[in-house]
Amino acid sequence: MTLDIAARTTCKTTWPDGACNEKSGSVVILSSEDDAADTIRPRLDAANADLTRIHILEAVRRQKQDGNTSLEQFNLQDDITALQDAIAKLEDVRVVIIDPISAYLGKTDSHVTSKVRGLLAPLTAIAQILRFSVIFVEHLNKSNLKPMYRSSGSIGFIAAARAAWCFGQDPENPSQRVMLPLKHNLAPEQQGLSYRIQEARPEIPAVAWGGPVALSADVVLQPEDSEERSECLQAMDWLREHLSAGPLPAPQVYREAKSVCISERTLKRAKGKLGVKSVKDTFGSGWSWHLLAAEEGQDTPKGATSKGWPSSPPVAPFDGQQGYAPDKEGQGCTCQDCGVHYGTLAGWRAHLRSRCVDTETN
């Protein structure tokens, strides 16, 4: 995933949601888990990255007390100045990827929030001054807490980030994975995206992006064993069929679910995954459960929450409107005013309204 982002950054490729990638640049990668030659390089090749703009930081040279020097692993505690100098020298760095962040903490205790904040503060300041983004990867633990609090270290990592995304398998389609928003401090609420990992070349994986999804991170990352999962799937089938004819009073649903041995906890989980909404019909009449997709005459979105993220703009067919040239194949087009390519017509329209170079100069 991070290498897909890196490749798009170096080549100014349209982002997976169709948004314009306005400026290309270099990427600095720190990766302690993947070898540069046999893993990182082939995956960047598969993603069509501009390798001249990829810079992998593997070690730093430190001077010992006896005057000799040695190559040692970079860490954010001791080598932040070296990182700053390297980025300033490159001049066009747009993204720094640290995977995983826990491997570059030096002697900092990752479970102490104040220590983590103190370690990340200089990196944040450098990013603001030199105008680049930092993407760091953090693994989740196996606790039953909400994803926001399941960092393998301190909550300070999530708190320091201005945006956080989590990744997991689609509960109803294990072959599909999802990228879901966890927090966004500087942007409106975001939608999730589906994707698959497929072979671009023999034994070389690449990301194949899908469409928007309305899934909750709490649902996707909720730990459950195989027996719990089976019970939830059965409850979802029962509830979907039960509400397909229209809304039912909540007490009636609980009562009838209990009669077929569906526990209240399992029923609530099924309700969340199906996107069933609780509605208070009239004053004093109690609550009823509505299967929204069924009322709209559509298939129920499996795993959808009652509060979905806004969907991306629909991709309209090319209608002969002047200002763009459609691709011969696919849904993309090229702006005739500024010459920039977009993956969808919706992306071009959004660009024309706010960012078109020709429009601004006129």
Image (cartoon, grey):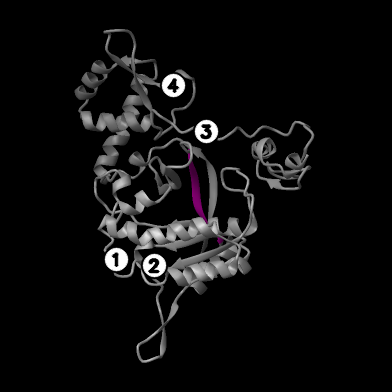
User: Image quarter for residue 214?
Assistant: top left
**Residue bearing mark 3:** 311
Disc 1: CA contacts within 10 A as few (<14), some (14-19) or many (>=20): some
- Residue 77 placement (x, y as % from top left): 36, 68
Amino acid type shown at disc 4: Ala
Marks 3 and 4, the one that precedes in the sequence: 4
Where does the magenta region start and end? 191-200
The alpha-carbon separation of the residues under discs 4 and 2 comes to 52 Å
Gap between marks 1 and 4 measured at Cα: 52 Å
Q: Give the mark nearest the N terminus, 4 or 2.
A: 2
Q: How many marks?
A: 4
Mark 1 vs mark 4: in front: 1
- The stretch drawn in magenta includes residue 37: no
Residue occupying image coordinates x 66% and y 38%: 354
Report the magenta stretch's main SS.
Answer: strand
Q: Position of residue 289 (x, y in %)?
A: 33, 19
Q: Which residue is mark 1?
A: 108
Q: Which circle marks residue 254 in the picture? A: none
Expressed as whole percent of the image width and height from the top left, the position of residue 205 reads: 51, 60
Specify the amino acid type for callout 1: Thr
Say the numbered circle drawn on residue 76: 2
Question: Can see residue 215?
Answer: yes
Label 3 crowding class (10 Å Cα cut-off): few <14, some 14-19, many 20+? some
Please report contact status of discs 2 and 1: CB closer than 8 Å, yes or no. Answer: yes
Mark 2 to mark 1: distance in Å? 9 Å
The mark nearer the N terminus, 1 or 4, is 1
Q: Secondary structure at mark 4?
A: helix
Give the spatial CA distance, label 3 vs label 1.
41 Å
Q: Does the image show residue 133?
A: no
